[in-house]
Image (cartoon, rainbow, N blue to C red):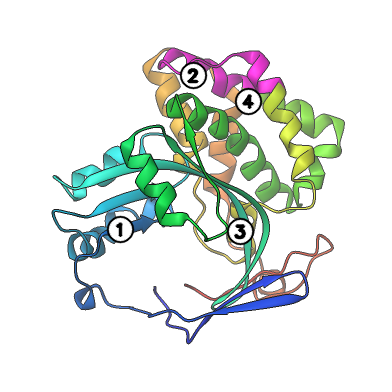
Amino acid sequence: VRSPFKELVVVTGASQERVPVRIVADSRHVRPVPWVLLAVKSFDTARAGAWLTGLCGEDTTVVVLQNGVGQAESVRELVPGTTVLPALVFIQAEREALGRIRPTYDGGIEIQASPEAERVRELFDGSGVEVRTQADLTRAAWLKLMLNCATNPLTALTLRRMEVFGEGAIRELALGLMRETAAVGAAVGAPITEQDAQRVLEYTSVYARGGTSMLQDRLASRPLEYAALNGAVVRLAELHGIDVPLNRSMLTLLSALRPLDSGIADGTRLETGLVAATHEA
């Protein structure tokens, strides 16, 4: 971690689970381990290289728990010869303070069906995190990207939780972003359609009370992960000659954002009820 803490506190409702952890803040102090769960934001992957080098040996498996598409390829370049497994995370959690986490939604983890996937399932057995296998993880990744390309930028730009998708104009904009993403996904070989976009849009009502990682990062004045989301759609659209004006607009707006004023970024609670934590972990 960047900032050491004594213990991990997981807050669920009115209860707290205190988890003893061994904290390491210097990559020089790690050694090869059987499993590495890589959950840094995509723009931090390269900077995690020293950690991966120190943690990975010939028997190590790295599970890549990141947003976007094609992230496992970037990790394989850093640790050639190591087993690298892409996975999709459907878990929402908010960091209330350094070492203090409140899960708001746990939809588990999805991974490509394979013998290795069964080993991942065994790893998480008893943890409370469900591991599901997918026959086509590429399709599943693009379905999730459709959701992320709409929910993350629109919550970050409006500074509102997922309840914002209850407004008709926002839903139409979200659907347009999803349709563009579906078109690009289909062009690169992911079997998704506009009908999938309609279905994915309905997920926004399931998460209505939740925030998004990009909203939390903006409130905390942290870097935003737009390059791996809308940026990926724009880059791949250009390669295939597809027009994606809405995703391009999101990319332009997000890249132009500046940190919020200190009255919000230093921890003020907004009407949305989302606490802006400024601690780095």
What is the three-letter code of the residue carrying label 1? Trp
- Relative to 263, does residue 201 appear above or below in the rendering? above
Q: Position of residue 275 (x, y in %)?
A: 71, 69
SS assignment for the magenta stretch, majority: helix
Which of disc 4 and disc 2 is earlier in sequence? Answer: 4
Return the disc, 2 or 1, that comes first in the chain's sequence.
1
Instruction: Please state if 84 lies on the left or on the right of 251 as rendered.
Output: left
Give 210 or 130, whichever is nearer the viewer. 130
Q: Earlier in the sequence, mark 3 or mark 4?
A: 4
- Give the residue at mark 2: 184
Residue found 67% across the figure and 72% down from its top: 11
Q: Which residue is mark 3?
A: 218
Q: Is residue 228 visible?
A: yes
> In the rendering, at what x and y percent does residue 127 appear?
52, 61
Mark 3 or mark 2, which is nearer to you?
Answer: 2
Q: Is residue 184 magenta?
A: yes
| Disc 3/disc 2 C-alpha distance (Å) | 27 Å
Say left or right for 137 vs 96: left
Q: Is residue 185 above or below residue 97?
A: above
According to the image, label 4 marks what residue? 178
Label 4 neighbourhood size at 10 Å, few (<14), some (14-19), many (20+)? many
Query: Going 43% across and 54% down the picture, which residue do you hit?
Result: 41
| For residue 173, above or below residue 106 | above
Residue that numbered label 1 is attached to? 35
